[in-house]
Amino acid sequence: MWLDRLAAGAASPSGSLTPSRPYSPSPRKSSHLAPTQRPGFGLSASRSSASLDLSANSSTVSLLSPPRLANGSSLRFEQRPPPDVPDPLKVLRGILGRSEDGADTDTGPDKLGKTQVVEVDFGGLTLEEFVNQETPSQSEAVGPSSEISARENRQKYEDFHSSIAECDQVLRTVESYLTHFKAELGQVSAEIENLQSRSIQLNAKLDNRRNVEKLLGPAVEDVSLSPFTVRTIAEGPIDEHFLKALHEVEARSAMIEAKEEKSENLKALQDLQPLLENLKAKAIERIRDYIVAQIKALRSPNINAQVIQQQTLLRYKDLYTFLARSHAVLAEEIGQAYVNTMRWYYSSHFGRYHHALEKLHLHVFNQHDLLGSDSASGRRNLGGSRSAPPQHDAFSLGRREDILKTKNDAALPAYLVEDSKSAHYLEVPFRNFNRALIDNVCGEYSVVTGLFSTSTYHQISRRVTDIFDPTFAIGHNLTKQLVETTNDCLGLLLCVRLNQHFAFELQRRKVPVADSYINFTSILLWPRFQKVMDLHCESLKKVPTSTSRGAAAAFSLVGGGSDASKASVAPHAITQRFGQFLQGILILSAEAGDDEPVSNSLGRLRTEYETLMGKLAKGAGDASKRAKFLYNNYSLVLTIISDTRGKLAEEQKDHFGGLVRDMTIR
């Protein structure tokens, strides 16, 4: 009987109150689910010994239960019982007669089993038919209360059956989800293995490509040109990118020539060579137009050539280098055009500067500025000007030597020269013109050396010389105009020292192209200096040497006294001039060498002076007065030159010191 089975099931060791799976209304199906307990459908051990037994639905595959998420189930679609179905646990507890806390409301399980076990004759009917059957005897025997209890139990079992069916539906859904999840895991695993195999293949291909690139990369680069390079040379502006593209074309051309020398006939080289030839021809054309445009700009009025030279020609000097290697004839023609332009540029500018310097007011030195000339005679101005010439000391160096010590290397601008109203000595225009000329020669030599770097040293020197030949001629003409009529011996020696400084400056800057100009300037200065020294010597010979005391006293520094004999022993006026003149020459010759003509010219002048003093001493009176007269004159010269330095100065001081000692002994 089913009540016996229910009672037996309640008394079974497992304590399961759930009928076995064959009695479920749902069809039985094999499941791969492991025997697990669904939360919310089992009874804990602390609350009851009875639990749902799902062992009949065991699976051969053990699946781990997925971890429960924080906000709901891990199932895709969580199955919940309908809200109008009673809780199966409550239905079971009601059938078994247990309270909510699990306590038995009857006397115990054994007593419940004894009261429920009743032999019932089903009469060949099923359980459902037997339950639905109503007999008058049964209804009469049971009574109204029993009929109500049976209906309640029936309702409870139907509810329980519905709960079990819902549980089966949920479990079938879980089983289906897990089955699909397992299949998806298998697919993911297969895809991961596929990705791993593809990754290994790609790594192998990448390694092979890198190895091939190391071998073929340089070779491919040698026989290819980028479109950017071609576009830059054909259409791009002349700038750094153009130079880089030009270097790349040259490198490819050199590579092709090297391959041809090795007799390597490659199809890539044959295809690249015509393109390189066309690019080189286009580059030559554009470089020619660019350099010619810059040369034309140098001929613009009031243009500063240094700006064009530094910002365009020297900045892109590799353009001319490429032109010289690719088309030597065209490069030579452009170089000659540059030489002609710069020759015109410098000759025109220095010609205007020369005319400006000619307008300077200069001190005039004529025959009245010689040692033996009468200082009281009137001076005549060159050119017949009615205005008197500016006053100056013809025999004292004064501050004129500062022009050698100045640290200002800049020449006087032309507009300042034209506006100058003061009088100057001849070394001022000489220094300004030659200072400007030397600076421009050095600058142009640097430009030509950088621009025509493919030329030899002699070719570069020849170009610079061609550029400055007219300018050198202007400088020589200026020097001739300054020195050919002057008797300014100190000014001539100052010009000699300035010319020597310019020569040292050229040697320091390593610019040899102006050596010929410096040498020719020296040739103009030294002969004139010796000639003026000879004029001084001749003037000393022409000094009156009358033996009368009046003549001696007339030339003395203490003239006008009543005692003529006392005045005759005073230093002569020529001694004062000679001392100052000698001091100036010794100061300017402090670092002079022994090969200069200063020493010989000074020796002749000193001899003429001593001869003149000896003649003038005869008019002083007796021997003691003559000795005192000579002593006073030589002592004055020694005093004036006592602060000079140098080898020549020491010789002169020793000589006059010996003369003073000789006069003292006498």
Image: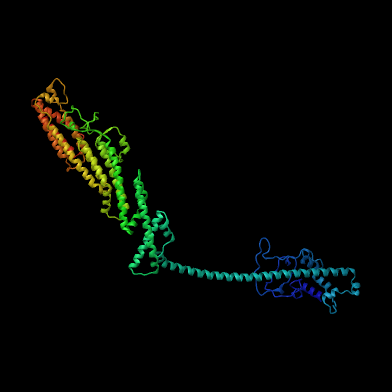
Tell whether 219 sits left or right of 73.
Answer: left
Residue lying furthest bottom:
124
Q: Is residue 28 left or right of residue 624?
A: right
Give the x, y percent position of residue 464: 28, 49
Q: Residue furthest top?
A: 562
Determine whether 487 is above or below 242 in the image.
Answer: above
**Residue lying furthest left:** 622
| Color style of the picture | rainbow
Residue 397 found in image quarter: top left
Is residue 644 visible to the viewer in this orientation of the structure? no
Up the image or down, 475 lies above or below 580; here it is below
User: In this view of the protein, which residue sits in the foreground, 55 or 193?
Assistant: 193
Whether residue 237 is visible, yes or no, is yes
At a point 32% along the width and 67% down the height, the residue shown is 261
The quadrant the N terminus occupies is bottom right
Q: Nearer the viewer, residue 42 or 257?
A: 257
Q: Quadrant of residue 31?
A: bottom right
Q: Is residue 546 left or right of residue 487?
A: left
Q: Position of residue 381 (x, y in %)?
A: 22, 31
Residue 657 at x, y = what percent? 14, 34
Q: How many marks?
A: 0
**Residue 221 percent across, percent down from the top left:** 41, 64
- Quarter placement of the C terminus: top left
Q: Quadrant of residue 586?
A: top left
Q: Nearer the viewer, residue 35 or 558?
A: 558
